Amino acid sequence: MKFLSVILLAVLMSGCASSSDEQASNDGLICKREKPTGSNIPTRVCRTPEQIAAMEKESKEGIRGIQRNSTNTVRMN
């Protein structure tokens, strides 16, 4: 029983040591683990640096558009 628990502990620790959130592959893709909306189970997503930059630019433009078009909806009479 003691031997089995030592093996189980070793397997669990090796699994934790080998996982990383972000990893660059040889073909220029950057892979990271992301949690999709509505789930706690992370999935591996790989993108090129150009795709990442385009997504960041699109997000910033979207936020600016929301801020630019927002109006004060509370009126004091």
Image (spheres, rainbow, N blue to C red):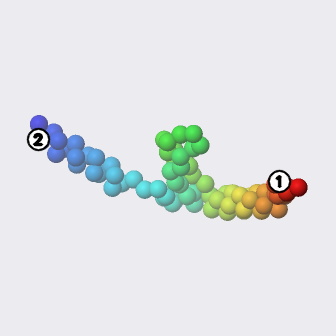
Residue matched to label 1: 73
Left or right for 31, reference 69: left
How many other residues sit within 10 Å of disc 2, few (<14), some (14-19) or many (≥20)?
Answer: few
Q: Residue furthest right?
A: 77
Residue 62 in the image: state x and y as whole percent.
Answer: 76, 57
- Report the residue at 57% width, 52% height from top: 46
Residue ID at (16%, 45%)? 6
Quadrant location of the N terminus in the rendered image: top left
State the residue lying farthest toward the top: 1
Q: Residues within 10 Å of mark 1 (few under 14, many from 20)?
A: few
Q: Looking at the picture, how far across and down is residue 33, in whole percent? A: 50, 50
Q: As shown in the figure, which amino acid type bears the numbered disc 2? A: Lys
Give the residue at the far left of this rendering: 2
Q: Closer to the camera, 75 or 24?
A: 75
Mark 1: secondary structure: loop
Residue 75 picture quarter: bottom right
The circle drawn on residue 2 is 2
In the visual, does 21 lie left or right of 59?
left
Among numbered discs 1 and 2, the one appearing first in the sequence: 2
> Residues at badges 1 and 2 in contact (C-beta under 8 Å)?
no
